């Protein structure tokens, strides 16, 4: 039976969820280039949404090239949600950062961050490598930035354009990090 007490409790939970979401959106995002000593020439300015791109159809991130073993910092502060191995990404780290955004770091040579640990832009979370489907290619960091809360205004008519509601172009953030 639904009592008044249940309804009040439900309202309180909804309010709490709303406040947590809002708080996450309001936290400012400080952003740094994740690959140590990388420059504006370490990545391709036009790589985002490049098509065709194998199994992924369009390219949803950026590859930042550097020597194998170069330290990788978290691009924002946040919490490591997951780190481990998968087929395409090889050694990877996934960080939940401000504004409910997920930051994915792949092809790492080594992982230096533990799941559920807090990281800042000073934290080394891994090193550049060639694991996963980067095997045989020049060492690089594969980096993607994804928002959990969809941005409907980012939707466009390009191939897989609806997925732009979730996948954010990291390149303007990287470029800007050199000017700050
Ligand atoms: Zn990549």
Image (cartoon, rainbow, N blue to C red):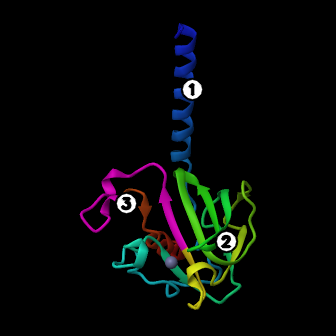
Front position in the image: 151 or 160:
160
Mark 3, other Cα within 10 Å: few <14 / some 14–19 / many ≥20: some
Spot occupied by residue 36 in the image (x, y as percentages of width and height): 65, 80
Question: Which span of residues is magenta-colored?
Answer: 143-164
**Which numbered disc flags the more N-terminal residue, 1 or 2?**
1
Q: Residue at x 64, y 81 (%)?
A: 131
Q: Is residue 58 left or right of residue 128?
A: left
Residue at image location 27% in from the left, 67% down from the top: 158
Write the residue at 42% across / 72% down. 56
Q: Which residue is mark 2?
A: 73
Q: Which residue is mark 3?
A: 163
Q: Separation of disc 1 and disc 3 at Cα?
A: 30 Å
Q: Secondary structure at mark 1?
A: helix
Horizontal and vertical percent for residue 50?
36, 78
Residue 124, above or below 153: below
Mark 2 surroundings: few (<14), some (14-19) or many (≥20) residues within 10 A: many
């Amino acid at each position: 039976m639904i009592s008044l007490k249940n309804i009040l409790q439900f309202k309180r939970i909804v309010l709490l969820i709303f406040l947590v979401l809002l708080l996450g959106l309001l936290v400012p995002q400080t952003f740094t280039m994740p690959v140590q000593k990388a420059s504006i020439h370490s990545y391709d300015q036009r790589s985002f949404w490049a098509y065709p791109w194998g199994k992924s159809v369009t390219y949803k991130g950026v590859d930042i090239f550097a020597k194998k073993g170069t330290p990788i910092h978290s691009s924002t502060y946040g919490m490591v949600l997951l780190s481990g191995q998968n087929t395409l990404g090889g050694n990877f780290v996934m960080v939940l950062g401000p504004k409910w955004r997920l930051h994915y770091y792949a092809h790492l040579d080594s992982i230096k961050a533990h799941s559920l640990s807090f990281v800042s832009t000073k934290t080394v979370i891994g090193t550049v490598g060639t694991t996963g489907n980067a095997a045989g290619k020049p060492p690089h960091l594969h980096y993607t930035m994804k928002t959990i809360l969809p941005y409907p205004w980012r939707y466009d008519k390009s191939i897989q354009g609806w997925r732009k509601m979730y996948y954010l172009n990291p390149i303007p953030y990287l470029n800007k990090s050199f000017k700050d």
